[in-house]
Amino acid sequence: MDKRAERKMEHIHHALSTGQRRLSGFDEITFVHSSLPDLSVDCIELNTKIGGLFLSSPLFINAMTGGGGEETLKINEALANAAKETDIAIAVGSQMSAVKNKNEAKSYEIVRKVNEKGIIFANLGSEATVDQAKTAVDMIEANALQIHLNVVQELVMPEGDRDFTNVLKRLEAIVKGVEVPVIVKEVGFGMSREAVRQLSEIGVQAVDVGGYGGTNFSRIENNRRERMMTYFDNWGIPTAVSIAEASTNRESGISIVGSGGMQNALDIAKAVSLGASAAGLAGYLLKILIEDSYEHLVQEIQMIKNDLKLIMTALGCKSISELQQAPLIIFGQAHHWLTERGIDTKKFSQR
């Protein structure tokens, strides 16, 4: 196993050990109760759309792994089976290892082999070229391509990148050069409204805010360092806040994906009401698969989908588009952040 593959496995083990700490901001969001919903659970529709791509549910399995030998192949095989069985989309982890070492391609190709008709997202870092992006998409016959932004992770990573110049130019070239929608995602540090606006201006179809509060890649990389850079461990924009910031760019037509510390249907419902069209879960589902069983993973995904229907019924929201208009109250640190950023929280509470 080469060094890149070894690092992939280290990330998996550290992600499980560092865990998630409910710091994503969703506990500072509450819905305005509807006493007269005039709706049946049987009428709820979960289908949604991101970047021109139609999904059967806002819930999907977000990017986790691949490129770490047989162990990551087995993980991706199980996740792909779960996605197929529950009819949700799935993203693979960064494919750069397979782009550079074809022997690792099978750990990604297994996802399409298992889930022949499913919605699958390819994944590469922002250092990728257009040709590498095309290779990643073709490798798994992907329906969309995630390009991840992980500046803080790279800075903390002992062997990480230190040069982030011309990222927007590379992203614009990829958007123009591939034939599938491009989703630009953060990896646990959130996106500001300014970043989302810049991405929209170069033609990016969707952003995944990847907010603070989920898997913490600063903590993971610090576990691999001799001298820890702990000042990055609490760095970032909480997921709920980041979605609210990103939603100020909705007039541009860019789709918003929420991810970062989501653990249940209520988190997903809040993310959608804040402006997201889909929600990716990663670390939470990985922990169930690794520490419990595949059967429990499938049960959990089905339960989340069913719970989301119950929550939408309680709110009187038949569709995801209606849920995006459900009134909610923002309080605590989330309210303080948005107020300081000049974002009027009343637009969420008085609609």
Image (cartoon, rainbow, N blue to C red):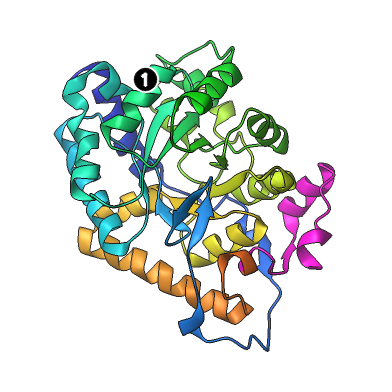
- Judge by depth and name the residue closer to the eye, 28 or 97: 97
Highlighted range, magenta:
323-351
Q: Residue at x 48, y 67 (%)?
A: 46
Does 241 appear in magenta?
no
The image position of residue 271, as x and y in percent, is: 59, 57
Query: The N terminus appears in which quarter of the rendering?
Result: top left
- Mark 1: give few (<14), some (14-19) or many (20+) Cα within 10 Å: some
Residue 89 in sight from this viewpoint: yes
Q: Residue at x 63, y 77 (%)?
A: 315
Within the image, what quadrant is residue 293 found in?
bottom left
Give above or below for 266 relative to 227: below
Q: Secondary structure at mark 1?
A: helix
Q: Is residue 209 left or right of residue 54?
A: right
- Judge by depth and name the residue closer to the eye, 284 or 255: 255
Does 346 appear in magenta?
yes
User: Disc 1 residue type?
Assistant: Gln
Q: Residue at x 29, y 68 (%)?
A: 299
The image position of residue 297, as x and y in percent, is: 28, 60
The image position of residue 256, as x and y in percent, is: 59, 47
Q: Is residue 343 left or right of residue 314?
A: right
Q: Which residue is mark 1?
A: 132
